[in-house]
Image (cartoon, rainbow, N blue to C red):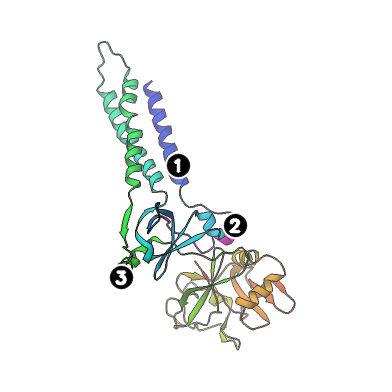
Amino acid sequence: MKNLFFTLLFLLLIYITASAQSDMPGVFPNQARTDSITPGKMYKAWLNVVEEPQKRKGVLFEIKDSSVMISNSLNKQDYFEGRYDVSQFDIRNLEGMKIRKKGNVGKGAIIGMATGLIIGGILAIVTVNNHPKKGFHIFSPGEEAMIVSLPFIPLGAGIGAAIGSAQIRIPINRSQEQFNLKKPMLNNYAIKPIPVISDKTFSVLRDTVVDMDGNLYHTLALGGQLWMAEDLKVTRYADGTGIKNGIKDASEGGYLYNWNAVNNSRKLCPTGWHVPSVAEWISLYNSLGADNSVAGKLHDKFSSDYQIGQWWSSTEKDSITAQHFYLNNETMAIMTIGANKKTGLRVRCLRD
């Protein structure tokens, strides 16, 4: 009986550990959704709206200058796929709100259960070690251990769930001034929305990125990828050292780099960005529809005004060549092919 008890205890611990891990972010099937953008933490919100009897609840989506946006139902897969309905509430109609991290109750219950299991296991060991060896006993040492320890598991789960259900209260009182004071905190709890991608087109974001020379680049989002909207034109690596070889000014904008500059450990792209691999280029192509219309979409938002666009990938083909992404707007040709590493081609950066 004693051995059975500890075997069950061990199996229960494995189950709790697996349950806790299952709530961790996973890898989604479509690589295009996960190359660059992650949803971060999501928070549930309960809004007290003037003249509405019930609280409006959903995931805190975005904080505007004078309003709060929530999504009625949102999980990570919906976020990546761009499937969400958003409701916007003017702060003049909001008395206050409560916020809690999504999934906190379940995680609290699991952590509490694990804590109760550990405490119960310790008490079980103490019970077994102090069990009298002589005299009449109603229960065996193992049975007494189970009687002592098992109640701590649901008790811990209940306490953990109660702690996890705690909410952050944020008063607004229909005041713009009060709202302005709370806005920095609210922005920490809101997720950064990505565009709806059902039409398989780029969306221009308000985010910008600056390189080592101070050049400013706008950004484009598509699914899980965040791209620079312009070709790279930096003359220094991310560590500040100059690019001595393989750089040449291109008349259409941006610079031409050889692959040795692309593959340099000092990093050609700004910190937090990288030269995309062939797989990431293909992911972009697939996200845009994987058909003849892709060339036009790239030309409109991505490839500036030149007729033929060629950008390096970070994928080496052999000792002499590396793969790059080729776009011909006239013939609508799109392909990934190899080029000599000494060739000067453009570079477009992708966010890590």
* x 39%, y 41%: residue: 110
From which residue to which does the magenta span run? Answer: 30-45
How far is the residue under mark 2 from the one under mark 3?
43 Å
Labelled pair 2, 3 in contact (Cβ < 8 Å):
no
Q: Is residue 327 visible?
A: yes
Looking at the figure, which quarter contains the N terminus? top left
First in residue order: circle 3 vs circle 1: 1
- Residue 148 higher or lower than 191, as above or below: above
**Which is in the foreground here, disc 3 or disc 1?**
3
Q: Is mark 1 on a helix, strand or loop?
A: helix
The residue that label 1 is drawn on is 19
- Residue extending farthest right: 331
Locate residue 343 relative to residue 136 in the image: left or right: right
- Residue extending farthest front: 51
Residue 108's tag is none
The residue that label 3 is drawn on is 177
Identify which amino acid the numbered label 2 is placed on.
Answer: Asn
Q: Nearer the viewer, residue 285 or 180?
A: 180
Identify which amino acid the numbered label 3 is placed on.
Answer: Glu
The residue that label 2 is drawn on is 30
Number of other residues with Cα within 10 Å of mark 2, as a class: few under 14, some 14 to 19, many 20 or more: some
